[in-house]
């Protein structure tokens, strides 16, 4: 091979070598590397998301698997069997599964008291109470307050004092008053005010409801 041919061949090799390591090649390789990295992250994330259940503790898995959807609720003295979701609130169960629509839904965040029911002898906001948590307890709604067609003394007193206006908050007000008088038949007005403070009235009939509580405490 002549000197000129050898020199030309070496220049060609050098050019190809420089082309392999040029700026455009480096950018292309960087893009390929980033693309591979992103694909790997997405693939691994999808795998972890799909198999996340496997990494939960045995206790957590047992809790999820062990929730019995068909539960027995003792409502207003009657045992009712009902299909309940794990995250279902008592308010939704009462209204939409058992048809007890006297329990009202308003704020749906445990602030207004329209959904108040009694669990045992204590008042509860049913919109923030999970149904599964009260499956073994006595639940009393507004439908269970009157007995044998006779209004409860609290209901009669509220009528006498013209407590309700729109009436939306009235079921919760009645439940709170009944629970108070069951625990304390002769409350002071301050005790009554405190017991009723968890029930909001959009019409502002607080004094009438309070007067009704005191009337009921005195026997009507």
Image (cartoon, helix red, strand yellow):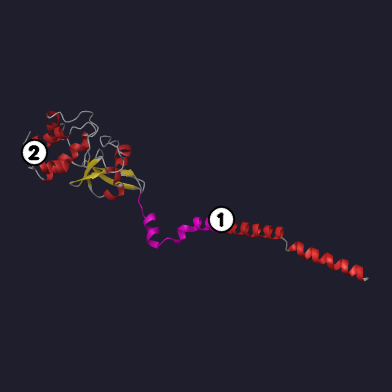
Q: Position of residue 153 (x, y in %)?
A: 11, 35
Label total for image? 2
Residue 134 place in picture, x, y as percent? 26, 48
Mark sitting on residue 213: none
Q: Which residues are magenta?
A: 42-68
Q: Magenta region's main secondary structure?
A: helix
Residue 165 in the figure: left or right of residue 6? left
Camera-nearest label, 2 or 1: 1
Locate residue 38 relative to residue 189 in the image: left or right.
right
- Residue denoted by label 1: 42
User: Looking at this view, is 113 or 205 the one in front?
Assistant: 205
Q: Position of residue 197 (x, y in %)?
A: 19, 41
Residue 5 part of the magenta-drawn span: no
Mark 2–mark 1 CB contact (< 8 Å):
no
Q: Disc 2 to disc 1, how far (Cα)? A: 67 Å
Neighbourhood count class around disc 2 (C-alpha, 10 Å): few under 14, some 14–19, many 20 upward: many
**Residue beneath the point at 62% across and 56% down:** 35
Does residue 77 lie above or below 3 as drawn?
A: above
Q: Is residue 138 above or below residue 10?
A: above
Marked residue nearer the N-terminal end (2 or 1): 1
Q: Image check: 37 left or right of 29?
A: left
| Quadrant of the rendered image containing residue 73 | top left
Residue bearing mark 2? 217
Quarter of the figure with the C terminus:
top left
**138 above or below 66?**
above
Instruction: Let me know if residue 153 appears in the view.
Output: no
Q: Would residue 58 be counted in the magenta stretch?
A: yes
Residue 38 in view of the camera: yes
Q: What is the quadrant of the N terminus in the image?
A: bottom right
For label 1, the SS is helix
Secondary structure type for disc 2: helix
């Amino acid at each position: 091979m002549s000197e000129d041919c050898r020199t030309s061949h070496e220049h060609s090799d050098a050019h190809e070598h420089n082309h392999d390591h040029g700026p455009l090649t480096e950018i292309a390789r960087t893009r390929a590397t980033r693309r591979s990295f992103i694909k790997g992250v997405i693939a691994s994330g999808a795998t972890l998301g799909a198999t996340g259940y496997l990494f939960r503790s045995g206790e957590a898995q047992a809790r999820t698997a062990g929730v019995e959807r068909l539960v027995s609720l003792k409502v207003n003295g009657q045992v009712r069997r009902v299909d309940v979701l794990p995250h279902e609130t008592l308010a939704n169960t009462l209204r939409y599964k058992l048809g007890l629509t006297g329990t009202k839904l308003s704020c749906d965040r445990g602030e207004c008291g329209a959904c108040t029911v009694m669990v045992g002898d204590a008042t509860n906001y049913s919109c923030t109470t999970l149904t599964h948590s009260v499956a073994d307890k006595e639940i009393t709604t507004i439908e269970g307050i009157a007995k044998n067609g006779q209004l409860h003394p609290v209901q009669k007193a509220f009528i006498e004092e013209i407590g309700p206006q729109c009436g939306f908050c009235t079921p919760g007000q009645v439940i709170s008053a009944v629970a108070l008088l069951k625990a304390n038949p002769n409350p002071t007005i301050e005790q009554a005010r405190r017991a009723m403070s968890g029930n909001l009235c959009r019409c502002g009939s607080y004094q009438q409801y309070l007067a009704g509580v005191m009337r009921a405490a005195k026997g009507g």
